[in-house]
Amino acid sequence: MPLIRAVLPDIDPVVHAALPLRERIRIAATFWADNGFGTPRYVHMIYILKVTVWYALGGLLIISATSDLGGLGNLDQWWTEPVVYQKAIAWTLLMEVVGFGGAWGPLCGHFKPFTGGARYWLRPGTIRVAPWRWIPGTAGDSRTFVDITLYAALLVSLATAVVWQGDRVPAALAALAAVLLVVNGLRDSIVFLAARGEQYLPALVFTAMLDGADFIIAAKVLIVTVWIGAGFSKFGLHFANVIPPMVSNAPFVPGKLVRRLHYKNAPDDLRPSKLSWGLAHFGGTCVEMLTPLILLFSTNETVTLLAVGVMVSFHVFITMTFPLAVPLEWNVLFAFLAAFLFWGHHASDGYAVTDFSEPWLLVLIAACLLVSPVVGNLRPDKVSFLASLRQYAGNWASAVWAFSPGAEEKMLKLDLPAPPMTDQLMALLKYDRPTAEQCMSLIAGWRSLHSQGRGLFSVFLARYDDIDQRTVREGEFMSNWVRGWNFGDGHLHDDRMIAAIQARVGFEPGELIVVFVESQPVHKRVQEYRIIDAALGVIERGTWRVADAVAEQPWLPNGPIPLEVTWRAEAATGVTT
């Protein structure tokens, strides 16, 4: 890949834009298989500098300067101190909740400016969506002075925890940050999810309530729960479809030949190969489920050290692929914590699960950590896939938007802190508009390489005769633009966000159509979709079989996969029956 300029499909952008949707998806998917997003390498260098210099080195400098531990030259003497864990969590949480961690920058749709997050969440009037309508004091969809104050208070509490001078983060300060994180999340789910609260909130609670060996053991149970939850989520038909487009987009994969090995017969058959299936379920599922159990229960130092090496290598590999949500800080932190918790505090030194002072309390902690994953796998419509610990498993709530000609311009009424995506690309890479549009079309190719993409596009092709003339947009990128952040959770841009947009913009029936799909529950073989007309609300509900979606090619050469309609509104304007 070139260092400075991006790579695009070898077709004139104007000609490309005039092609039928399925042909555009075929071009984008086959291009992605060989080139990924075609990102210039200087973008990856920016990420590497951000992670190594700002996050890792900056974090170590702050921790060493504020914890009475010694300088970086004495790191071997203090890296296992509990305060290092506490401040590493606070530092990472601060980075994430500001919007400077995962889902930052051009690789996940923040082209220019690179940062969403605080740019939106400190601005009155931007859209917010509470996770549950029944919580008192959370009504409305507009960010107010109360929201801004709560968010600013969270930032201050975390920054204070990071720079607090002493040998531990005060319990009261950790408790305050935990409470503020929850309250912010109840007002607007995006703040809690951006903070990765499902993982860092328990760490704050442990800092506030536990000490000594109990603190370390609880932290071990937490990280093992995260690993195993992620591993469990990779069972099923979805995850094997994640590996090929992820490897294709990895900057350090040497050449097209290696990329094509992850597909059955690229460019003609872009379903995952046996190699991808093996990486998914041996390199992914088995590693994430079995190795953490070894770490948690091993009392043999050699076995523990080998298992630590496996998990560190696992996170290094993910980091080097630059997955599209770019959770680089999270992976660096978890690689460090694997060594910190299990090698730095070995079970034989009094840090085994059997050494917890109150066994009943440890059982309660484990049960509480499992509530969200269990409920989220059974009722994914009720719990974010992040809180369900289904990170990057391919089983996501997702959405694709389609505007009638000229209707997208109405979105400018939102007066957002960033310009539209095509304008951002034009500013960053100096593209003309047709080229920027062609670049945006590559995201449809990426989506189609995943199982749910084939279902989403099937609904459009089956229901809308004018889909070839519509402007098609990826829901995640629209969430980035409208709300400042997204990490693959379609709940952040579901019908509630569409209703908030409609109240401000006023689309006519048929001008903005969104096809949304919920994650697959663990005990069902189908995914539930719904069609949302911005002006009319939900106008159709139905299902498709996951097996049908994964069996098809990304561009649906045999036509839409079978759909089963469970309900349709009488006012379903423009829908082909």
Image (cartoon, grey):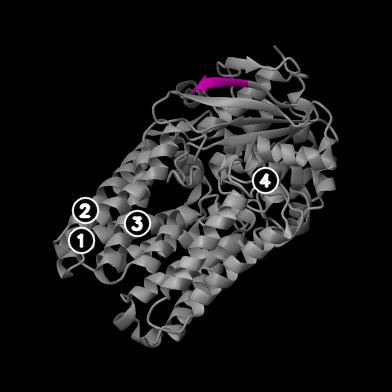
Disc with the residue nearer the chain's start (1 vs 3): 3
Q: Main secondary structure of the magenta part?
A: strand
Question: Is 397 rendered above or below residue 67?
Answer: above
The correct choice, above or below, for 279 with respect to 187 in the image is above
Read off the magenta span. 541-545
**Taking 527 as reference, is 515 left or right?**
right
Mark 3 highlights which residue?
Answer: 223
Lower position in the chain sequence, tag 4 or tag 3: 4
Dots 2 and 1: beta carbons under 8 Å?
yes
Mark with earlier residue (3, 2): 3
Three-letter amino acid code at the position of disc 3:
Ile
Earlier residue among tags 1 and 4: 4
Residue that carries the numbered disc 4 in the rendered image:
139
For the residues labelled 4 and 3, the Cα–Cα distance comes to: 34 Å
Task: Measuring from the top left, give residue 371's x and y in whole percent.
Answer: 38, 44
- Which comes sooner in the sequence, label 2 or label 1? 2
User: Which residue carries the number 1 mark?
Assistant: 304
Image position, residue 340 (x, y; %) = 31, 68
Q: Nearer the viewer, mark 1 or mark 4?
A: 4
Q: Is residue 346 left or right of residue 270?
A: left
Q: Nearer the viewer, residue 258 or 537?
A: 537
